[in-house]
Image (cartoon, grey):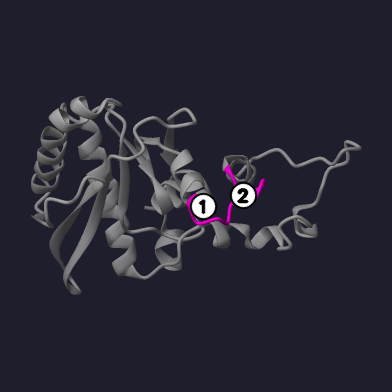
């Protein structure tokens, strides 16, 4: 991992992110999970879309392997058993209940230099038909890891919370990515992000913190 990043964040957090990336790579190679899971939430945004404004330490995935209820019910035990296998292959002690109809949380325990710790994997089954295409993305933290990212999940959550604004959706996230083209107003003039956004009434520099979950 980049030494500059190591110096920016607590070592316990850096270790968790290293473990998270290892686990994502393992899950991505598991024959029963390929093409069935897409990353969403804070980890997807922080590590695979933006320029790592903060480190997220849990994995949120949506099942996208099938849409029909009967197909999902048949495949769910296979998916969850495979997630457990991927975690156990890396030495984690897997715990957590069977979950409800919406999904299941896996708690993966391990021992670190700072004592017992854990990371969580939330597998959700309620977003099987994404509104936006699934995008394969890489993270600058680790060469060679490409993860399917479910961009629409965060947008839906914000709609459910009643706080979505026209410029807080996926397009806003794309504009915040490194290398994104500058915005232009109706007259074709380049707009300085530091000027803020009158619709959101917030400095555009604060937007990632508002979009991303609290640490």
Q: Pointer 2: residues within 10 angstroms few (<14), some, or many (20+)?
A: some
Q: Are marks 1 and 2 in contact (CB under 8 Å)?
A: yes
- Residue lying at 14% horizontally and 47% vertically, measured from the top left: 87
- Residue lying at 13% horizontally and 62% vertically, measured from the top left: 110
Q: Position of residue 72 (x, y in %)?
A: 21, 30
From the image, tell me which residue sits under label 2: 168
Residue 9 lies in magenta, yes or no? no
Q: Position of residue 112 (x, y in %)?
A: 17, 67
From the image, tell me which residue sits under label 1: 158
Residue 166 lies in magenta, yes or no? yes
Q: Secondary structure at mark 1?
A: helix
Q: Is residue 116 visible?
A: yes
163 left or right, relative to 126: right
Q: Give the prevailing secondary structure in the magenta stretch.
A: loop
155 left or right, relative to 186: left
| Viewer-nearest of discs 1 and 2 | 1
Q: Position of residue 70 (x, y in %)?
A: 19, 26
Q: Which residues are magenta?
A: 160-169
Instruction: Calculate the distance from the C-alpha at mark 1 to the C-alpha at mark 2.
Output: 9 Å
Q: Pointer 1: residues within 10 angstroms few (<14), some, or many (20+)?
A: some
78 left or right, relative to 195: left
In the rendered picture of this protein, how many numbered marks are placed on residues? 2
């Amino acid at each position: 991992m980049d030494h500059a990043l190591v110096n920016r964040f607590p070592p316990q957090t850096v270790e968790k992110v290293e473990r998270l990336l290892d686990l994502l790579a393992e899950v991505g190679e598991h024959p029963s999970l390929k093409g069935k899971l897409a990353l969403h939430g804070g980890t997807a945004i922080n590590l695979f879309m933006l320029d790592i404004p903060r480190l997220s330490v849990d994995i949120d995935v949506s099942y996208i392997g099938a849409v029909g209820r009967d197909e999902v019910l048949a495949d769910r035990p296979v998916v969850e058993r495979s997630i457990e296998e991927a975690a156990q292959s890396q030495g984690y002690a897997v715990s957590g209940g069977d979950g409800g109809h919406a999904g299941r949380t896996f708690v993966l325990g391990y021992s670190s230099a700072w004592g017992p710790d854990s990371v969580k994997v939330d597998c959700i089954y309620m977003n099987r038909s994404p509104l936006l295409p699934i995008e394969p993305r890489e993270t600058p933290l680790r060469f060679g890891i490409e993860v399917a990212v479910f961009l629409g999940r965060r947008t839906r959550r914000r709609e459910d919370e009643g706080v979505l604004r026209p410029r807080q959706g996926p397009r806003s996230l794309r504009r915040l990515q490194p290398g994104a083209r500058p915005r232009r107003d109706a007259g074709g003039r380049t707009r300085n992000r530091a000027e803020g956004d009158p619709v959101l009434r917030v400095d555009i520099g604060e937007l990632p913190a508002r979009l991303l979950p609290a640490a």
